[in-house]
Image (cartoon, rainbow, N blue to C red):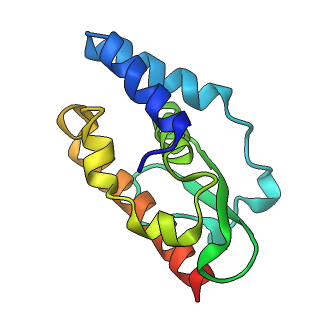
Amino acid sequence: MATEAFEEIAETFEFLDDWEDRYRHVIELGKAMDPLDAAFQVPATKVEGCASQVWFLPRIEGQGAGARFDFQGDSDAMIVRGLIAVLHALYSGLTVREVLAVDAGAELGRLGLDEHLSSQRSNGLRAMVERIQKLAAEAAG
């Protein structure tokens, strides 16, 4: 159920044999993202449970379970910005119902992230996924 953008990342990861190359690719994805305006880097948008500073600003179009989900995110750590870009590719454009149905562990597992991230980063990634699911659940009503 992954988006086309996420499938492209997964295909690139298959092509890149070395984890260092994959790590650099994740960082490049983060660098390509637009930064979140500092006015939105506030406690209300902060993702708790991350070692780095992380903010998510949801953008929901429509009402109920069929509303389209999108978000903008940012972090003070380059690898985390890249992980936000990966999550954006995984979830952006789905309905909130579809967001809630995504098996993020399985999809992210296809990239091998769980094997190569520190426990702190893995916990932070889980916290980001939980925040996305919470935002989608709130939008679904």
Q: Is residue 13 left or right of residue 138?
A: left
List x then y, in percent, for residue 113. Answer: 28, 36
Is residue 23 visible to us here? no
* x, y percent for residue 133: 46, 70
The residue located at (72%, 81%) in the rendering is: 63
Seen in the picture, residue 25 relative to 71 is either above or below; the reply is above
| Position above or below: 127 against 105 | below
Residue drawn at x 66%, y 26% is 32
Q: Is residue 15 left or right of residue 106?
A: right
Q: Identify which residue, 127 or 68, lies in the foreground.
A: 68
Res 136 seen here: yes
Give residue 141's quadrant in the image.
Answer: bottom right
Above or below, 49 against 141 in this view is above
Left or right, residue 38 beside residue 6: right
Q: Nearer the viewer, residue 54 or 68?
A: 68
Q: Position of residue 43 (x, y in %)?
A: 63, 71
> Residue 61 location in percent, x, y?
76, 68
Q: Quadrant of residue 34?
A: top right
Residue visible at 46% across and 49% down in the picture: 52
Residue found farthest to the left: 115
* Residue 110 placement: quadrant: top left
The image shows residue 97, relative to residue 41, as above or below, that is: below
